Image (cartoon, grey):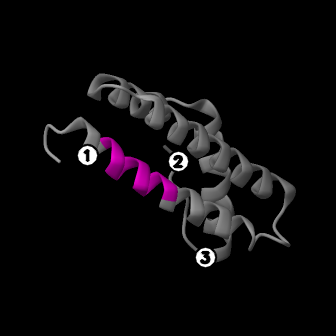
Amino acid sequence: ASGNFAAIKAAVLTSFGQLGSAVNAEKSLLGSAPANVKAAFNTLAGVFAGLKSQIAASTSLAQLEGTFTSLGTNPKLTAASKILANYYGSKCGTVAPTT
């Protein structure tokens, strides 16, 4: 896929499709989780669905890179990730990173 934008895009879309399925499967297991954890999963699912749409609409490697750059600076994703890390850390006995 090196240098072949169409192949790269297809592979990334496949991966994000699988990731979306995994997030949705996990959401179905959150029956007794606190409301903020459920909301964080909904945020996560929404961010990744939006990202998948942006990937599908990209027409160049530069646009694809920009999509991933925006993911790394998404404040909603950062906040949801912290909630989930704290929740799973409390359930699994691991410590959530402070960074």
Q: Amino acid at mark 2?
A: Thr
Question: Which residue is denoted by mark 1 in the rendering?
Answer: 7
The answer to which quarter of the image holds residue 95 is bottom right
Kindly state the secondary structure of the residue where label 1 is placed. Answer: helix
Q: Earlier in the sequence, mark 3 or mark 2?
A: 3
Residue bearing mark 3: 92
Which mark is in front, 1 or 3? Answer: 1
Taking the spot 47% from the left edge, 28% from the top edge, the residue there is 70
**Which residue is most to the left?**
2
Range of magenta residues = 9-17
Residue 33 covered by magenta stretch:
no
**10 Å crowding of disc 3: few (<14), some (14-19), many (20+):** few
Name the amino acid type tagged 3: Cys
Q: Circle 2 is placed at which residue position?
A: 98
State the residue in front, 82 or 5: 5
Q: Picture coordinates of residue 3 (x, y %)?
A: 14, 37
Q: Overall secondary structure of the magenta stretch?
A: helix
**Residue 46 sits in which quadrant?**
top right
State whether residue 42 is above or below residue 54. below
Residue under the point 58% across and 40% down: 78
Q: Is residue 52 left or right of residue 90?
A: left
From the top left corner, tell me how far across and down residue 49 is, in percent: 60, 44
> Where residue 31 sits: x, y (%)?
84, 72
- Proximity of marks 1 and 3: CB atoms separated by less than 8 Å: no
